[in-house]
Image (spheres, grey):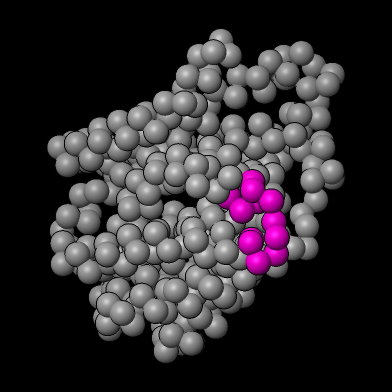
Amino acid sequence: MHHLKTKIENYQIYIYFTAILLAIITGLTSTHLIKLLESVIPIFIGILMFSMFSQIPFLKLRKNALSGKFIMALVLSNFILIPILVYCLIQLFNITSPAILIGLMLVLLTPCIDYVIVFTSLGKGNAQYMLISTPILFILQIILLPLYFAIFNSENTFYFIDLAPFIQSFITFIVLPFVIAALLQYFSKHALIIEKTLNITAWLPELFMSFVLFAVIASQIHKITHDLSVIATVIPIYILFMIIAPFLGYLSGKLFALETTTLRTLAFSSSTRNALVVLPLALSLPDSWVTITTTVIITQTLVELIGEVFYIKIIPKFIK
């Protein structure tokens, strides 16, 4: 069984690409499934996060407390260097449409706080560090987002945005799976059935990552095909972002002389954005902006998920 698990991990990139291809075909040919797929995305993400948390030995986390250097590197990359990169990309591509601008800022200025933990683990980073740092990322992005909007000359638009989805997603996708996994680990010492349940969860991350990829892409692909001009505008920005962002995370870690797995963690954190969380924020915008802004965000999700499949192979190979 262990041999089979190792094979699944080794071939996960092909599993994910298969899921992406099937999702594109399904999304474009079976539009009657869209509502169903959208409804199961939160369930799939919740199970994915729970299965990932179940692999992290929480009872030993005290031995792996975050270092001050890692926190400083995390803040430097996500809240100083990445915003500078985003500002430069917006200027380079001369983005003036408020709806596109808001979408870009919402999705690129907010570091991921959920499935980045999974990708960090798959990419041989420090998933424990990534997990422990999520409250820091969560709080800072809420505090700093209005400041970024002001700096980017969009201070008035921020007040159209409802921050409740941030809090709801943090509780649903981080707090609840974390608490359940930690409690199961604690009680597994006294109950064999709980220990066996935790052993089964070791098989779930790759499976449910495939489900998440399939459900997100298949349910959203039809929406972006109606705004091809918007897609053509933002895809080059996203590709450049995904090329440059991991280097900024890596350089931040190097500046503080951090070790290899931590450098990989910073690379994943810097390049993985909060698209699934900020998508509901876009729905609180004025009607004239909603369609374009959501297209901008959904397109980033698709580009990022495909990019992450490459990251989990490339980042461990180049950061060693």
Answer left or right for 145 relative to 40. Answer: right
Residue 127: percent from the left, percent from the top?
Answer: 64, 43
Between residue 286 and residue 12, name the one nearer to us. 12
Q: Check the image and report above or below for 280 versus 82.
A: above
Answer left or right for 192 relative to 15. Answer: right
Between residue 167 and residue 312, name the one nearer to us. 312
Q: Check the image and report above or below for 17 versus 170.
A: above
Residue interval drawn in magenta: 253-265
Residue 195: percent from the left, percent from the top?
Answer: 73, 18
Between residue 70 and residue 162, name the one nearer to us. 70
Q: Check the image and report above or below for 186 versus 40.
A: above
Give the overall secondary structure of the magenta segment: helix
Residue 254: say if magenta. Answer: yes
Whether residue 60 can be seen here = yes
Residue 319: say if magenta. Answer: no
Residue at image location 55% in from the left, 48% down from the top: 319
Between residue 78 and residue 253, name the one nearer to us. 253
Image quarter (top left, top right, bottom left or bottom right) of the C terminus: top right
